[in-house]
Image: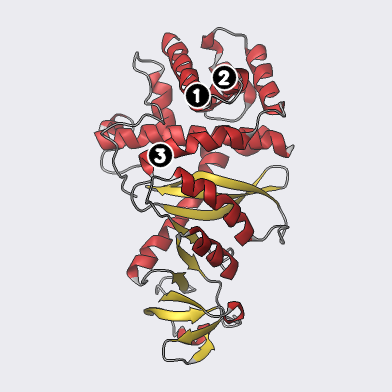
Amino acid sequence: MQTQLRLLHTWQAELDRLLPDIRATRRHGFAVLVAGLLWAGTVSLPRIAESLVPLGAKVPSIERRLRRWLANPAVEPEALWRPLLPPLLARWAGPHPRLVLDPTDLPGGHRLLVLGLVVRERVLPVAWRWLPNQHKWEQRLGEIVTALAPAITAALPPGVVPTVIADAGLSGPRLLGACVAAGWHYVLRLPLNHNSRHQVRLRDGREGRLWALVTGPGQHWHGAVDIFKGAGWIPVHLTIHWDVRHKRPWILIADTPGGRAAVATYRRRSHTEATFQDTKSRIWHLPVSKLTVPARLARLVVAVVQAMWWAATLALTAIRRGTYRHYDRGDRHDLGLCRLGRLLFACRALTPHLPTSPFRLSSATQTVRE
């Protein structure tokens, strides 16, 4: 109990330092919800309130307080998140950050387009945009990324340039143009089959269908070409990778020489699935919230994102120091970053030692192996 009280007071003080322009009651409500998410391991407000009972209040009172925070129109998720992102990226982005762009569906017919940092086998959200869950979005993807890019670039350490990774359903000339305008690198997969109309121009001037370059399983080819004729021929580095175990090839375009490097970078995209499973089924169970009002769901999501970063920070620190073996197997990692970090957070409540802050910088900070 005393450790929980000390932790909450320390956590509130840290948010006071990082969010001085946010009203104290809103900061402290955010602090309580984030800590409760990590202790309870669910978005269910009754269970979060039960996990906070040792703090001295009654369960109904805590639950009402959390519901008022989620319903408060003065709580702006972006205003909470924007100042927290730079210290997180300063600690974990490394010199060559990879950002995966991928959408996920949420309760109430909502869709979240997430741009997240690849850290080991997870993709931790750095920016996101709410979209209607429909086939055609009102705002074009390139416009969305263009709007998100300035805040991310400003939050990254000076001189650090990210690489954007996107799947075939999102890639196209508009997304490529948004990456170029932001000064970012990119590795994008193109949707391609025998009906594809993508045109390609080789360096010798020959033009033809991109599909004509794909020969069959086992093919590996890369080179500089021009693509997107309708957009005025954009120069890219093309990689064709068709694993014999896969039914379809990977057709990747990048702004830097491709080949194995482009394939290895694109493989990071698969980590988004495990991350979304953490939020939906393994840990926090977002559908359990039953929130359908977009504004309330947005406030819950920013708290879950902060809880994810804190859990990942604890897990990464334990892995770096070797102390994770007290909670996971030593020969392999059965627990993902978020599950391991949440376990560490909960166990620290039984000891006098507070969990490591997600914002604490030190000389021990180093690039994390992805």
Foreground label between 3 and 1: 1
Query: Is the Cβ of the residue at disc 2 closer than 8 Å to that at disc 1?
Result: yes
According to the picture, the residue beneath numbered tag 1 turns out to be 15
Q: What's the amino acid at mark 1?
A: Leu
Helix, strand or loop at label 3? It is: helix
- 257 in relation to 15, above or below: below
Specify the amino acid type for callout 3. Leu
Residue 120 or 154: which is nearer the viewer?
154
- Give the distance between the C-alpha atoms of the residues marked 3 and 1, in whole angstroms: 23 Å
Q: Residue 47 location, x and y as percent? A: 59, 22
The numbered mark, 3 or 2, whose residue comes first in the sequence reads 2
The residue positioned 36% from the left and 38% from the top of the image is 91
Q: Position of residue 157 (x, y in %)?
A: 39, 45
Under circle 2, the secondary element is helix
Q: Residue at x 47, y 92 (%)?
A: 206
Asked if residue 28 is positioned above or below residue 155 in the image, the reply reads above
Earlier along the polypeptide chain: callout 3 or callout 1?
Answer: 1
Pointer 3: what residue? 337
Would you call the spot at circle 3 few (<14 residues within 10 Å), some (14-19), or many (20 or more)? many
